[in-house]
Image: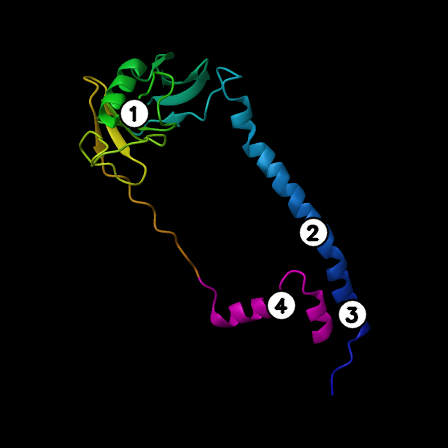
Amino acid sequence: MKPIPTVAAVGVVLAACLATPRLTAQTTDLRADYERATSVRGRVQNKIYDVIDTPTWIEGSAKFWYRKTVKGGNQFVLVDPGTATKVPAFDHTRLAAALSTGSGVPYTALTLPFTTMTFVNNLGAIEFDATTSLVVGRAGTPATAANATAGVPRWRCTLDDYQCIRIPALAAPVPSVRRLPVAAEASTAMASPPPGSCSAWWAWA
């Protein structure tokens, strides 16, 4: 014989069903707020200048660098707190010319194809992912249309003679996946019916 639902059980099910539209509306509002927040950078780009990105300390050094907006693009600045000085992190014009030659993609001093970088060789070179490159080459070689490869190219550029070469991409971190015990997975699945399945709850009750 089918069990008769108690008043308490019916009340819980009814409350859950009535709350579903409200939760859906809240989720929609949160999504809209998030999209507005993430679009701020694009909406103010090239309209607000001297906006500084988060500074990055250089490993093994007392210096740090940051990227800031300027009219026409961005610049990188190197800061030495010990001497209270700041200078361009590198010669932007020479780096743009070297990277343009190596990649086959034209860049300018203010439109370099990266937002973050790593200083290496005692600040004698930088490494970065050229996220806006259109044509890339084999690691360690200039890019050409003939040897273009898929993926985001990583570059190393020396800051004394301004030579840029492709280098192997950094290995992606392996995600750590932790599974619930079988019993826990089963109980979780039984306790949470699919969205919009209030009728299923009533049938079960």
**Nearer to us: label 1 or label 4:** 1
Give 23 or 187, whichever is nearer the viewer: 23
Disc 1 on helix, strand or loop? loop
Whichever of callouts 2 and 4 sits on the residue coming sooner in the sequence is 2
Q: What residue type is labelled 4?
A: Ala
Residue 46 in percent (x, y) is at 49, 18
Note whether residue 205 is visible: no
Question: Which range of residues does the magenta coloring cover?
Answer: 179-205
How far apart marks 2 and 4 lie (CA) works out to: 18 Å
Mark 3 Cα shell of 10 Å, populated few (<14), some (14-19), many (≥20): some
Q: What residue type is labelled 3?
A: Val
Residue 61 in percent (x, y) is at 30, 25
Image side of residue 86 versus residue 50, left or right: left
Q: Against 14, is 170 above or below?
A: above
Residue 25 in percent (x, y) is at 70, 47
Q: Against 24, is 147 above or below?
A: above
How far apart marks 1 and 2 lie (CA) works out to: 48 Å
Rendered image: mark on residue 105:
1
Q: Does the magenta stretch include residue 193?
A: yes
Mark 3 — residue? 10
How far apart marks 1 and 3 lie (CA) works out to: 66 Å
Note whether residue 149 is visible: yes
Q: Against 190, is 104 above or below?
A: above
User: Which residue is at 77% across, 58% downward?
Assistant: 18
Rendered image: mark on residue 23:
2
Disc 3 on helix, strand or loop? helix
- Quarter containing the N terminus: bottom right
Rendered image: mark on residue 191:
4
Give 94 or 173, whichever is nearer the viewer: 94
How is the model colour-coded? Answer: rainbow
User: Which residue is at 33% across, 45% downward?
Assistant: 172
Q: Does the magenta stretch include residue 107?
A: no
